[in-house]
Amino acid sequence: MALFGPEQRKQLRIANRVSTVGAELAIATLLGLFGGSWIDARLDTRPLFTFLGLALGMAAGMKGLFRLVRAERQKTAKSKANPPANDPKAP
């Protein structure tokens, strides 16, 4: 006996991807922040590399978010172009 139907499994996969992107955004931002802070402490250039690391970390996290959005758009476009044969909404 299946615990989830196909639609629930699809929603769980999407939720998993979204939560992964959230974690990726947070981790990249924190790594950039702490990496920049570490470099500033070594070179005594506070807060130059802290801000630079923060900006680079945020950019890396946003890249992951954009990658997810692009992949989901492509999947949606493919599914609209090729609907399942047993889909009652299909034209």
Image: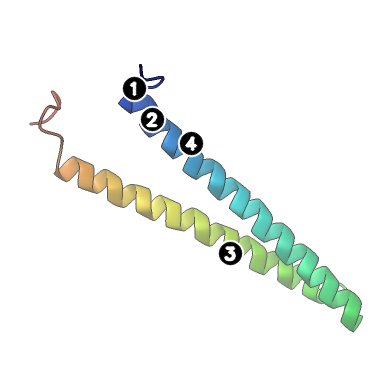
Q: Quote the CA–CA distance across marks 1 and 2.
A: 6 Å
Amino acid under label 3?
Ala
Q: Quote the CA–CA distance across marks 2 and 4.
A: 10 Å
Amino acid under label 2?
Arg
At horizontal 59% and vertical 58% (from top left) the residue drawn is 61
Amino acid under label 4?
Ala
Would you name the residue on which mark 2 appears?
A: 9
Would you name the residue on which mark 1 appears?
A: 5
Crowd rating for badge 1 (residues with CA inside 10 Å; few <14, some 14–19, many 20+)? few
Q: Position of residue 54 (x, y in %)?
A: 72, 65
The image shows a total of numbered marks equal to: 4
Q: Pick whichever, 79 or 48, lies toward us.
A: 79
Q: Is residue 55 left or right of residue 77?
A: right
Would you name the residue on which mark 4 appears?
A: 15
Q: Are marks 3 and 1 in contact (CB under 8 Å)?
A: no
Q: Are marks 1 and 2 in contact (CB under 8 Å)?
A: yes
Nearer the camera: disc 4 or disc 1: 1
Nearer the camera: disc 2 or disc 4: 2
Nearer the camera: disc 3 or disc 2: 2
Q: Secondary structure at mark 4?
A: helix
At horizontal 39% and vertical 22% (from top left) the residue drawn is 4
Q: Quote the CA–CA distance across marks 3 and 2.
A: 29 Å
